[in-house]
Amino acid sequence: MKRFPLAGPAVKQSLVKQSLVKQILSHVLPIVALFGVGGLVVGTGSVGLQFILEPKSVAWLNDYLPETLQIPLADWDRPHTLEEIKQNLTKGDLTLGEFIDLPNGDRITTISQPRYNCVNRCDRITELRVYRKAKAYGPKKNQTHYRMVAQVAVPSANDRVILDSLQAGNSNSVEVEEDLPLETFDRLDAPNPKSGSWFNLTGKRSQGESNVTYGQLFHYDESRTKLTALIQWASPAETDPIVWRSLTNNDSPKLLINQSIGLEPRFLAYSLTKSTATPELSLISIAQPALNTMEFEQAIDLAKAGLWSLAADRLKTLKPKNEEWPTAAQLQFNFILYHAKMAKLQTQENWTNATQQVLAQVLDGQWKAAIDPFEKDPTSRNEMREGIALEAPRLWKRITAALKDDPSNPYLQAWAARVTVDRDGKSKAIAWVNQQASSSDRTTALKLLAPELIPKAPTAKQVPQKIEVGAIESLQSPTRFNQQPALPITRPNQIPN
């Protein structure tokens, strides 16, 4: 009979470990199984509740279920071929637009409806829809089918949005008597890769001398299949009316709506404060200063008057080095910096018209530089003064704001005098100039801008030639050769009668 050696210490230790693992598994596996079953029950209950409240929200399960277990849906919400979708829309006098493919495979499109009593441009977009490829059963199961997963109604554009965009540039009052249809559909580049998909519905309108592009912004969150209508906007700009762009070199992109008219830079800027599900856009405003200090408030007042560069220079001196202001103040600072940059670009244009060059510089608060063209081009002085007179109301707002900030600036005083002549007449301009401290720089500037305000130098009085008394008596006495009285003595520059 064979005998086996007794187990050594190593074998005993291995047996103990195996026994311990079995004990742990015997306790853990039931717990895992319990949680798994519980999760399945909860998940099933959640899906069941969604189905009860909104059957469409769980329609995606049909792509994974056999035909006998399909979730019942209304006929219009079942998967349809593209041709079937078009036919169903035609019954309601609707038209399916072109598809735009999305990164996750979904497809977004427009639904249009004709406007009645219309001569041209009669189709208007009334709805946006998102479709997703879906499985289908039946005789057409081999054809591509789509199921609508999101939709949103599209209202007409708001007239007031267009009026505000025009009147912001000092346009004349405008009346709009009809609703404004949205007619074209385009993708808008996203501010960042994780912010979903952005789209614009737009239309165009000619209003006086301005051509306005108006529209409404939409967002689609692919992960939640949520389509949202956002802000309405309008812009008289021909290029880039609405775009995501950074205000400075180191900040996140902002939504910029270009409402500049002529030489007036003006932008609406929105911060993206929430980029998932339903995005939140917050308007950056300078209506109220973000910091309660006199210096900051003065800079904001300059910006409100359109003196962007002066406001930016003032804020740069206030901002601590290598420090950030509170978020609201930093946004106002960046907003002003961007406008100052656009205003500077206007002054650096290669203007063929000297008047445009001068106006761009005055609008930017470059008081001294705006006088240089008067000195360099004497033949165009009258033309430039006439151009300034036409813009007097717009310039006055800037000049009065600047005088509060820098009243002793001689070049600013000269511009104030010039505009006062155009607004209120020569006498009031002279009275105002006489109340200010005189300086040689201001006098030089006034000679170019408003020469009519410079008093003429008195002419030196000419002294009559000295005539001897005897000679006068001889002229006044009749001679023995001629009994006629002599001509009266005349003063210099006096014509005898």
Image: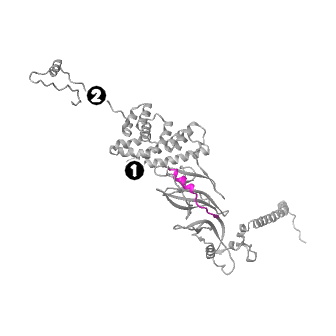
Question: As drawn, is 417 to the left or to the right of 302?
Answer: left
In the rendered image, the vertical position of residue 71 relative to residue 8, given as above or below: below
Residue 341 seen by the camera? yes
Question: As drawn, is 11 to the left or to the right of 113?
Answer: right
Q: Position of residue 154 (x, y in %)?
A: 61, 63
Give the magenta-colored segment's residue range: 152-169
- Which part of the image, by quadrant, shows the C terminus? top left
Q: Position of residue 180 (x, y in %)?
A: 56, 61
Callout 1: 10 Å neighbours few (<14), some, many (20+)? Answer: few
Q: Which residue is mark 2?
A: 460
Report the front residue among 63 and 428. Answer: 428
* Residue furthest bottom as drawn: 139
How are the colours assigned in the image? one colour
Residue 446: assigned label: none
Comes first in the chain, label 2 or label 1: 1
Callout 2: 10 Å neighbours few (<14), some, many (20+)? Answer: few
Asked if the stretch drawn in magenta spans residue 166, the answer is: yes
Residue 103 seen by the camera? no
In the rendered image, the vertical position of residue 274 relative to residue 486, given as above or below: below
Q: Position of residue 129 (x, y in %)?
A: 63, 67
Q: Amino acid at mark 1?
A: Trp
Q: CA distance from mark 2 to mark 1?
A: 45 Å
Say which element carries label 1. Answer: loop
Q: Nearer the viewer, mark 2 or mark 1?
A: 2
Say which element carries label 2. Answer: loop
- Which part of the image, by quadrant, shows the N terminus? bottom right
Q: Amino acid at mark 2?
A: Ala
Q: Position of residue 350 (x, y in %)?
A: 40, 50
Q: Quadrant of residue 448?
A: top left
Asked if the stretch drawn in magenta spans residue 432, the answer is: no
Q: Which residue is mark 1?
A: 351
